[in-house]
Amino acid sequence: MLKELKTRPIIAPQPVLIVGTYDADRVADAMNVAWGGQCWDKYVALNISSNHKTTENIRNNKAFTLHIADVDRMELADYFGLVSGHKEHKMEHVHAHTVKGKMVNAPLIEEFTLAMECLVVSMDDNGDGGTRVVAEVVRTVADDSILDENDKVDFSRLRPITYDSEQHLYRKVGQAVGRAFHDGAALK
Ligand SMILES: Cc1cc2nc3c(=O)[nH]c(=O)nc-3n(C[C@H](O)[C@H](O)[C@H](O)COP(=O)(O)O)c2cc1C
């Protein structure tokens, strides 16, 4: 029997993205974003509250970095989503290490193993306290520990986490169960 549910963010899996930005004094900030993702081959999108420190920083710099949170960085990722840069110098508090991106005025957080440098293409008020940001990825860096012999990201090495917004849990991305653009051919 189908039950009707209240509308809520139910699409799964939701990513755990860590957005890095600088403020006007070059203080690095980071926030946790679940409502974001790939929106074309070189473009990503974020949906973020307009009053976050991150949103202010992106508005000023037209740039940010994006890191993929993984099992080993779960606690750090959650912290970045619990505390605002308006109140605390988060990087200093957790002794995280940052270096300026090569292509953008935003910090790469060295603790993460996969990161993208992004330049803002558009920022739109969503009319409900939020801002939709679309950005072009201009540089991607990965620690070689998560790459296979062809320099492709091996997700079993990266061990990305996903946010379960129903249970308020982080889950690790699971095992491969099929081949994309291939297994459906059996039904052709
Ligand atoms: C798992 C998780 C996911 C989150 N996803 C979002 C999101 O998609 N958009 C958003 O505006 N805030 C999101 N937040 C809340 C921000 O990360 C949080 O308010 C953060 O403190 C903002 O930091 P800032 O003020 O330094 O930018 C999320 C928090 C957590 C823990």
Image (cartoon, rainbow, N blue to C red):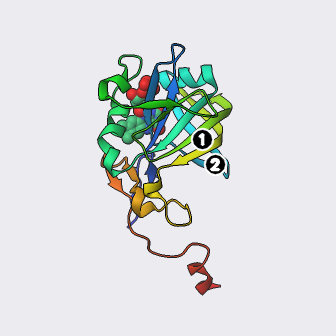
Q: Amino acid at mark 2?
A: Cys
Q: Position of residue 102 (x, y in %)?
A: 61, 34
Residue at 54% x, 20% y: name it: 56
Locate the C terminus and report the quarter of the image it occupies: bottom right
Judge from the rendering whether residue 141 lies leftward or rightward of residue 85; answer left or right: right
Q: Check disc 2 and report the residue beneath it.
A: 39
Q: Mark 1 is on which residue type?
A: Ala
Query: Within 8 Å: ligand 1 and the Cβ of disc 2?
Result: no
Circle 2/circle 1 CB separation < 8 Å: yes
Closer-to-camera residue (51/62): 62
Residue to which mark 1 is pinned: 45
In what quadrant of the picture does the N terminus appear? Answer: bottom left
Instruction: Give the percent coordinates (x, y) of residue 37.
Output: 55, 47
Q: Looking at the picture, does residue 179 appear above or below residue 97? A: below
Mark 2 / mark 1, whichever is N-terminal = 2
Q: Write the residue at 56% across / 66% down.
A: 150
Residue sitting at x 40%, y 63%: 156
Left or right: 74 with respect to 131? left
**Can you name the residue that lies furthest to the top here?**
25
- For residue 180, which quarter of the picture? bottom right
* Structural distance between the alpha carbons of marks 2 and 1: 6 Å
Residue 93 in the image: state x and y as whole percent. Answer: 31, 24
Neighbourhood count class around disc 2 (C-alpha, 10 Å): few under 14, some 14–19, many 20 upward: few
Q: Is residue 138 left or right of residue 24?
A: right
Figure quadrant, ligand 1: top left
Q: Is residue 69 visible?
A: yes
**Residue 52 showing in the rendered view:** no
Disc 2, SS:
strand
Residue 168 screen position, x and y as percent: 31, 45
Q: Nearer the viewer, residue 124 or 178?
A: 178
In terms of image quadrants, where is residue 119? Answer: top right
Label of residue 188 in the image: none
